[in-house]
Structures are given as structure tokens and as C-alpha cells.
Image (spheres, rainbow, N blue to C red):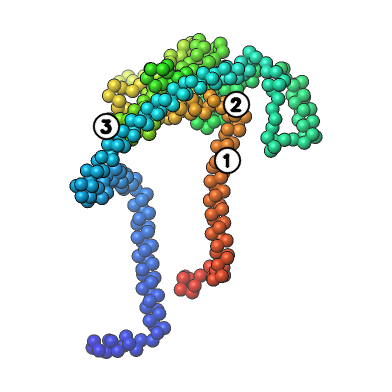
């Protein structure tokens, strides 16, 4: 019987053999499809994803096994390199301390210019014709006809409106133009921020722990009595003894705000809500008024307090992380380049960086297409029409 079977297989028609192969391929394809569907279902299960993420988190920072495989004498030398690296971290910390001193020095040189900017914004100083003369870039140059048209339109606007003082809503416009800051703004914040006249950065004095303070100057208004609101950020520029290799320059360790002296009924960081409560026994209903926190930019001046233990819940950690980013951004970008954020030019520069990356990606795709076209063996028709064995029956 075995011989007969072998004989039958040997004498099987080639066309029948092709059918067998196609059936096997179809069965394998179905198995792969089922496996793919099962994988997708598992990946959509939040419990499975959480367990997988926990496993991956546990692998972060775990040794690869290579160090353990090194001879003892080599490990000894690696330890010497680590000690050198710690010394490098301490030198780097000194470098950043000197950078901070340079920042203090040059802040004093910048400040007269920033003070004059503030005077122009709040109409304390009217710039001369010479100071207002601005030579546009080549891209910004206009034809004589366009200049004349723009001049006529400006004159019309001047006739329609009263002569504005300074640059109205300068800082509010800056905030609204920057996504990081505009996300903090609420509609009820805007009337208050129209009174913001200046933002200054003050660095800690020489010999004092590293820190900087943001000072927000307001004109007299109907919302609070303060003329200046402050936010101080404490920084550290030294390696952590328990983890010296993590040092990557100064880091913000904490921040303190200030008390806003709100005028009665004007505190936008709080809102009043009314709730109805039903008595369990008597069934009577009463209305209770509660004061609860309200979203507002001015919560920026009341950051979460860091306990002595240094431990925070997840929400507070997220708030502080965002707070540090905002404080650093205001210090590094907004204050030094305020006029460019007012006009939108600084934002356009940021957008150009992203556009260039996109263009590079497009270029790469274009190069791939060109390579295919230049390939002498490339035949587009073959790609357009799949082989017979790939077609569904």
C-alpha cells in the first residue's frame, strides 16, 4: 500500500500539485490573518497594555549583561572612568555657575533697553522719527504703489479712531500668540491682562543660591491692588550625589508665587456654584452655595507647595512640570524677544523649523520615487497589476 501511495504521488498531475500548493498557501494566509486579528484585539485591551508597559518600564536602566561579562581587571578600569566622569560633572556645574554670573552681568546691560521698551508700550515715551525708521527685509519691501495704498489706509484708520496711547494690549497679544501661554488664558483673564505693562527678569545676587524672579507690572486696575506680581524659581547647579551622571545643567527645584490682593468680587481664580441637597430623613431640599477653584492664568502665582519629603501626587507633579517649562520659556524667550512674539515673527521662525523637516521628508520620498524611475529594470505596469497567484479567486 505504501508503494502504491508513493506511486500515486509520483504520478500526480503537475496541475494537481499546483492546486495543493495553493490550498496550503490559503490556509497559511488564514492563520496569519487570525493571528493578526488576535494581536490587534490584545493591543486594544487596556489591562494587557498596562501590564506590557509595566514590564517595559522594569527593563529601563537594567544592565544588558555585557558589563557582567567583562574581566575583573577591565571592570576596575571602567570604575576609574566613572570617577573621572563624576569629576567632569562637578566641573560642568562650575561652568553653569559662571554662565549664571554672565547672565546677571548682561541682564544689567539689557535692562535699559527693556525699560525703554516698557516706556514706549505704556506711552511714557514717544519714540523719535529716527527711532521709528525701520528698513524692511528684501522680502518685506513694497512697491511704491503698495506703499501709497497702505499709507492711505493707515490715514483712514487714524481718522476713524482716537489716537491710541503707546501700544495697546501689547503683552496680552504676546500671550495670545504663544500656544504655551494662550492655553493658560481664560476669557475672564483678558480684561485683567490688558493692564499688564511689563515683565522683568531678576537674577539672584552674587554669592546667593541660584534663582530668578519673574516680575509682572500692572497699571492700577479694578481687579487687584497689587502693582507687581512675582514668581520666583529656585535652581540647582550641582550633581546629585545619589545620581551624579544624571546632571545636565541647572534645573528648577521649586517655585514660590505671591499673594494677589483681589478686590472683593473680582477674584477670577475662584467661582461660586450652587448645589441642591436633599435631606435623607425629612426629604426636604436646600440650596448650598460653594466656592470652588476656577481655571485662570492667575493660578500661575499659586503653584503647589512641595512638602519637605519632596513627594508629590501625580497631578501636582504635572502642574509643577508645566509651571517650570512656562517660567523658563518666559525668561529665555518672551522677555528678551517680546516684540517678535507680538508681531508673530518669532512664531513664524519656529514654524519654519518644522516646515523644513517636513520638506526634507518629502524630498526623501521624492528621491525614492526618482530611484525607481531611473532603475532600468523597474516596470510600473508590474506594480499596477499583481501576479496571478496574488489575485483573489
Q: Is residue 385 above or below residue 329?
A: below
Instruction: Tell me the element at label 3.
Output: loop
> What residue sits right under mark 1 in the picture?
352
* Crowdedness near tag 2: few (<14), some (14–19) or many (≥20) residues, C-alpha within 10 Å: some
Are the residues tagged 1 and 3 within 8 Å (C-beta)?
A: no
- Mark 2 or mark 3, earlier in chain: 3
Query: What residue appears at the point 26 percent right and 32 percent down from the top-left corner?
Result: 242
Residue 252 in view, yes or no: no
> What residue sits right under mark 2 in the picture?
339
Closer to the camera in the image, 186 or 326:
326
- Looking at the image, how many numbered discs can be counted on the residues? 3
Instruction: Tell me the element at label 1.
Output: helix
- Mark 1 or mark 3, earlier in chain: 3
Instruction: Tell me the element at label 2.
Output: helix
> What residue sits right under mark 3 in the picture?
242
* Crowdedness near tag 3: few (<14), some (14–19) or many (≥20) residues, C-alpha within 10 Å: few
* Gap between marks 1 and 3 measured at Cα: 41 Å
Closer to the camera in the image, 113 or 333:
113
Amino acid at each position: 500500500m505504501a508503494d502504491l501511495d508513493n506511486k500515486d504521488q509520483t504520478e500526480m498531475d503537475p496541475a494537481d500539485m499546483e492546486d495543493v500548493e495553493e490550498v496550503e498557501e490559503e490556509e497559511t494566509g488564514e492563520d496569519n490573518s487570525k493571528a493578526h486579528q488576535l494581536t490587534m484585539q490584545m493591543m486594544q485591551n487596556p489591562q494587557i497594555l498596562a501590564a506590557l508597559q509595566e514590564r517595559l518600564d522594569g527593563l529601563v536602566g537594567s544592565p544588558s549583561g555585557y558589563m557582567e561579562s567583562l574581566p575583573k581587571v577591565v571592570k576596575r578600569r571602567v570604575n576609574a572612568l566613572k570617577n573621572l566622569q563624576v569629576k567632569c560633572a562637578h566641573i560642568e556645574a562650575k561652568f553653569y555657575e559662571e554662565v549664571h554670573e554672565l547672565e546677571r552681568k548682561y541682564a544689567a546691560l539689557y535692562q535699559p533697553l527693556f525699560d525703554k521698551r516698557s516706556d514706549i508700550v505704556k506711552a511714557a515715551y514717544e519714540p523719535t522719527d529716527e527711532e521709528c525708521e525701520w528698513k524692511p527685509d528684501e522680502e518685506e519691501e513694497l512697491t511704491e504703489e503698495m506703499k501709497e495704498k497702505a499709507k492711505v489706509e493707515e490715514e483712514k484708520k487714524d481718522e476713524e479712531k482716537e489716537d491710541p496711547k503707546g501700544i495697546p494690549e501689547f503683552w496680552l497679544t504676546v500671550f495670545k500668540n504663544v500656544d504655551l501661554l494662550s492655553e493658560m488664558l481664560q476669557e475672564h483673564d483678558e480684561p485683567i491682562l490688558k493692564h499688564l505693562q511689563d515683565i522683568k527678569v531678576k537674577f539672584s545676587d552674587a554669592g546667593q543660591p541660584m534663582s530668578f524672579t519673574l516680575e509682572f507690572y500692572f497699571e492700577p486696575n479694578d481687579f487687584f491692588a497689587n502693582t507687581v506680581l512675582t514668581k520666583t524659581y529656585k535652581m540647582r547647579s550641582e550633581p546629585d550625589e545619589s545620581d551624579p551622571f544624571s546632571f545636565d545643567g541647572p534645573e528648577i527645584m521649586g517655585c514660590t508665587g505671591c499673594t494677589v490682593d483681589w478686590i472683593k468680587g473680582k477674584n477670577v481664580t475662584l467661582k461660586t456654584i450652587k448645589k441642591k441637597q436633599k435631606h435623607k430623613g425629612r426629604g426636604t431640599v436646600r440650596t448650598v452655595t460653594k466656592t470652588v477653584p476656577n481655571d485662570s492664568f492667575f493660578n500661575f502665582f499659586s503653584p503647589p507647595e512641595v512638602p519637605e519629603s519632596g513627594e508629590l501626587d501625580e497631578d501636582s507633579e504635572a502642574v509643577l512640570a508645566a509651571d517650570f517649562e512656562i517660567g523658563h520659556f518666559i525668561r529665555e524667550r518672551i522677555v528678551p524677544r517680546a516684540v517678535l512674539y507680538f508681531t508673530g515673527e518669532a512664531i513664524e521662525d519656529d514654524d519654519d523649523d518644522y516646515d523644513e523637516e517636513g520638506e526634507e521628508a518629502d524630498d526623501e520620498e521624492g528621491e525614492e520615487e526618482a530611484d525607481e524611475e531611473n532603475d532600468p529594470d523597474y516596470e510600473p505596469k508590474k506594480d499596477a497589476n499583481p501576479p496571478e497567484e496574488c489575485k483573489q479567486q
